[in-house]
Amino acid sequence: MTTPRRREPKMRQETILRREEILKAALQTFGSKGYNKAPLTEIAEQVDMTHAGILHHFGSKDRLLLEVLSYRDQTDVAHLADQHIPDGIELFRHLVRTALLNSQRAGIVQAYAVLSAESVTDGHPAREFFEERYATLRGEVRHAFEAVCAEHEVSDRSRIDDGAAAILAVMDGLQVQWLLAPDAVDLARSTEFAIRAIVAAVVDSPPSLLDAPAAPPAAATPPREPFVSLGDSMSLGVAAS
């Protein structure tokens, strides 16, 4: 006698679909109005629910935003192989393309910037999310650096670790500058410039600026060949309008 296959309860599947519907509506609302100006009632109206219904699924507005950020991360890589960011030099191109995408959704970038900054305070509901997110991203960027450095016979672990942390810091910092002065900062182009400079610093090992003695001006030398080509695709669509 065979045991019949257990089917997932209908209500459970409906709940999953309903939560995704709410996340899509919240992503659009947070993206257009920002976190503070996006009332839960407006999100609820988009999905024919009440304010209490939204809280039933997510508990609080903070928790809903965290779920939206996680959902956004998933949609960012949905088109990629294995739904995961690439490795090696392709990862750095992916980061520039992500900056270009972010320049088209100021609201969600603003919400991300505000909540990530607030998360450093004790007991903030977003702290664990961002701790895990940064740890994961540092690991992925570090792994990409290892692949690039292996091609150039570079094995300095501290430079690789510093480079990974610096790229994430620059991307987040540029987002804040862009939010404050969007006409003065080209988010994608500045991100590309910074990533090129950081990767070059890791691979080429310039002298330390911390404790090196001042040196007399060096004689002019011919420009060096690029340490590694990031390709023209890095600049695709990121020129200032």
Image (spheres, rainbow, N blue to C red):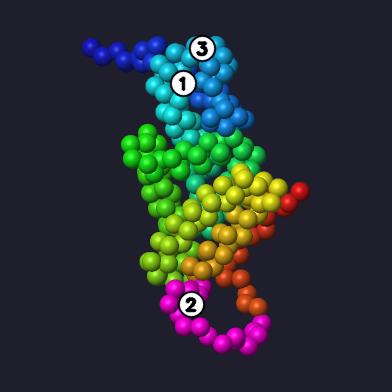
Q: Which residue is mark 2?
A: 207
Q: Which residue is mark 1?
A: 19
Sequence-first tag of 3 and 2: 3
Does the image show residue 74?
A: no
The amino acid type of the residue labelled 2 equals Pro
Q: Position of residue 164 (x, y in %)?
A: 45, 58
Sequence-first tag of 2 and 1: 1
Sequence-first tag of 1 and 3: 1
For the residue pair 124 and 222, the one nearer the viewer reads as 124
Task: Tell whether position 75 is magenta.
Answer: no
For the residue pair 190 and 140, the one nearer the viewer reads as 190
Q: CA distance from mark 3 to mark 2?
A: 60 Å
* Residue appearing at x 53%, y 58% in the figure: 89
For the residue pair 87 and 177, the one nearer the viewer reads as 177
The amino acid type of the residue labelled 1 equals Arg
User: Which quadrant of the figure has residue 59?
Assistant: top left
Label 1–label 3 contact, CB within 8 A? no
Q: Position of residue 85 (x, y in %)?
A: 49, 47
Q: Which residue is mark 3?
A: 49
In the image, which residues are magenta?
Answer: 204-222
Q: Is residue 58 above or below residue 215?
A: above
* Residue appearing at x 55%, y 11% in the figure: 48
Q: Is residue 32 above or below residue 6?
A: below
Does the image show residue 212?
A: yes
Drawn side of residue 208 relative to residue 216, left or right: left
The amino acid type of the residue labelled 3 equals Met
Q: Position of residue 208 (x, y in %)?
A: 46, 75
User: Which quadrant of the figure has residue 37?
Assistant: top right
